[in-house]
Image (spheres, coloured by chain):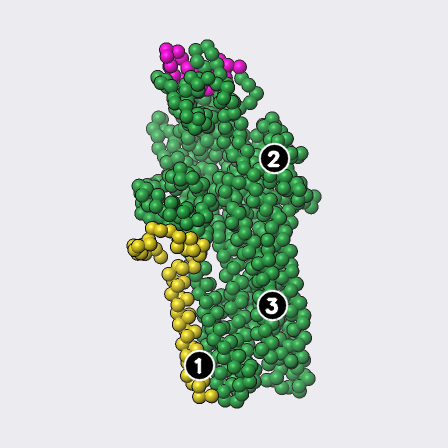
Amino acid sequence: MTIASMRPSACPACDAAPAAEALAGRAPLPDARLLLSVPGVHCAGCISKIERNLTDMEGVNSARLNLTLKRLSVDARAGLEAKDIVARLDRLGYEAHEMDAGTISMTETEKQGRDLLMRVGVSGFAMMNVMLLSVAVWAGAEGATRDMLHLISAMIAIPTVAFAGQPFFRNAWRALRAGRMDMDGPISVAILLTLFISLYESLLSGAHAYFEAVVMLIFFLLVGRYLDFRARAVARSAAQELAALEVPRATRLNDGQESVVSVADLVVGDFVLVRPGGRVPVDGVIALGQSEIDRSLLTGETLPVFAEKGHVVSAGEVNLTGPLQVRVTAAGKDSSLHRMADLVANAESARMRYTTIAERAAAAYAPTIPLLALGAFIVWMYLSGGDLRLSLNIAVASLIITCPCALGLAVPAVVTSASGKLFRKGLLIKDGTALERLAEVDTVIFDKTGTLTMGTPVPTNLEQHPADDMRVALALAAASSHPLAVALARALTERGVQPAPVDDITEQPGYGIEGFWQGQRVRLGRAGWVGADARAMTAAYLGIGDRTRTFTFADQLRPGAAEVVQALQAQGKAVRLMSGDVPGAVADLAQRLGIDHWQAEALPQDKAAAIADLHARGHKVLMVGDGLNDTVALSTAHVSISPASALDAARAASDMVLLGRDLSPVADALRLSKTAMQRIRENLWQSGIYNIIFVPIALLGFATPLWAAFVMSVSSITVTLNALRLK
Amino acid sequence: MEVLAILIPVSLFLGLMGLVAFVWSLRKGMYDDPEGDSQRILDPRYDDKPKPVERDD
């Protein structure tokens, strides 16, 4: 029904940059309401467990879990960060994600929702009362009694229309001033004209007054609008607010003096310091220091890359082990990150032009209503020889009968029903038109790291190692924040291994960790440094004296990944894999999942170009990805999905977000979107058929208020029931 | 027909009461989390005495 339906103005480009440049050392926040998405909650036990545990937590004033939205709202004192709560919930056994900063403006959206609901309620109660009075008229009240009942109905209907009809009048006025014609124009005209003529008729003790039809029309239209509003309000990305909140900062070095400056103030030739764990804020060349660089967000490579003096680094990469001094070669608008943000903006604006089936239906429908009524008026004026009252009455009857009550419910009812079903399965629809676009998809492209896989390495050969070696490895691994070391330490701890007493543990940035155990030097790190033979797979090497051991790692498959690929292929979709990772890893995964088309070492532009190429050949692509390197592809694709673990920028660029760890809702979503579109089409036909039957009756002058009320309610109810049939 | 003089005001009054009740429940945020509310009733924590009142709007 919302014809001039606006997409929430997502602007992933705005936050692609700051999200990646979000540096360590953000300013402490004041008391704040933190919002977390907790997809795993489902029962009373979850509510009391989480709320009780969090209320006991240091820094938490109060916590409340909303089970309908699966959202936890925490009133926190200054200093407490969302990630502390995420960690706590993780220990409780619940997966949680901090929600997009945009949803913090939810309070505003909630207010709008309540406002709409209030209007729905008012028009609903008014409708019931007016209907009660109208039944008396239909039952045969005559003369003074009928006039009195009509006037009492008018007393209820006029204030109701004045209050509950405001959303339509406001939209119509806005559209009129902008010189556009949308559905709210004819609706407003129909409401006001009918109300006016009915009042006039009641004052002249006429037989027909359409008060109940007017109020009913408003009620049903508002219900449709409320459903529509809820569907699109669930996750609105206010990327601009995010961009305004996070001022990306960098540590600049001036003759050995450190000063924190805004990234925008950096110029080419400056030196910046990047601490371990921090993100590289600019493009540059390493001037001093050795470390390892995690490029997975930019390129999809799983393995950290060794970096030392002279190596080139790009904005968005994460420094892992040692401090680095970087000479700036490109900052701000010229940096690779910004270029990516521009690409995203371009792709986004191209996709804005999608017109939904509701818009197409309304575009055909909007001019028809007033034209039909006007035609009826003119023809009857001619036929009746200038009987103004009769002609006006017939015009109003046809206006009110053609007014698209069921049309207003046809699409929102189905979309609400479908998105509710998907939400319970763990998929959040961010964009109102996404479901419709999803139904058209014939090709699915997956990213590898972080999408089909969890993006975290898991040791694969622990059982081959003697207990002592594992104890030494644990002692060394626990001292580092390198991803492999962290994964190793976690896996060993889970096996119940106790760390060996290793002394003098030091980390050699870029190489590994070193220490002394029982008088021997022990090392965990790169093959060459430890003195082992390098293997062709992801591995960390342990050296004890002259003995060496190899710990191999593999990226863990995301749960449901294999099922989803199979299900999609069974649905007849072409499945492809595109990754920035090395060919070996990609080919291995493609083979394991049974994907024939795969491409490795794909740059962000390559992914987007491949999608654009598929689109040019008439395919519709669903992109599933999580990294910065996927943002361009996500916004180029016909429709896109990203997991909740993805970067803010990727989530902002995609149309749907997977709330849980499991990938299998993707296949359900594709299946359900097809059925949903089927239902929408049926609904549109249904409301069309009602009109085809009843418009001639109205035009011929046989329509009574009873007919109008009957047609309106029956068509609205059948349309809603049809939507609920969605399985 | 004299009975209408009583019945119409009564029906209007009842309708108004319903509307007032609806507005009140909406303002209290009773439609914010229907699923959670239906589950919270199973929570034994406040069986003996009600939960201390919190202003959360």
What x and y, as percent, mark residue A307?
48, 23
Q: Is residue B22 visible?
A: yes
Q: Distance between the residues labelled 1 and 2?
A: 71 Å
Q: Depth check: give the residue in front, A579 or A502.
A: A502
Whole-number angstrom distance, CA of label 2 to CA of label 3:
47 Å
Considering the numbered disc 3 on the image, is that residue within a helix, a strand or a loop? helix
Q: Give the range drawn in magenta.
A: A514-533
Which circle, 2 or 3, is nearer the viewer? 3
| Chain containing mark 2 | A
Give the residue displayed 41% in from the left and 63% down from the top: B26
Residue indicated by mark 2: A578
Residue under pointer 1: B8
The residue sitting at the right extreme is A617
* Amino acid type shown at disc 1: Ile
The residue lying at 33 percent from left, 54 percent from top is B47
Q: Does the magenta stretch include residue A82?
A: no
Give the residue at mark 3.
A715
Query: Local crowd at mark 3 within 10 Å, few (<14), some, or many (≥20)?
Result: many
Q: In which quarter of the image is residue A593?
A: top right
Viewer-proximal residue, A46 or A231?
A46
Label 1, residues with CA under 10 Å away: few <14, some 14-19, many ≥20: some
| Image location of residue A268, percent across then percent down | 46, 32
Q: In which quarter of the image is residue A82?
A: top left
Secondary element type, mark 2: strand
Horizontal side of residue A688 vs A242, given as left or right: right
Q: In this view, does A200 lie to the left or right of A523?
A: right
Vertical placement of residue A410 versus A431, above or below? below
Chain coloured yellow here: B
Q: Do the residues labelled 2 and 3 touch (CB within 8 Å)?
A: no
Whether residues under marks 3 and 1 lie with C-beta atoms below 8 angstroms apart, the answer is no
- Chain under label 1? B
Tell which circle, 2 or 3, labels the residue nearer the N-terminal end. 2
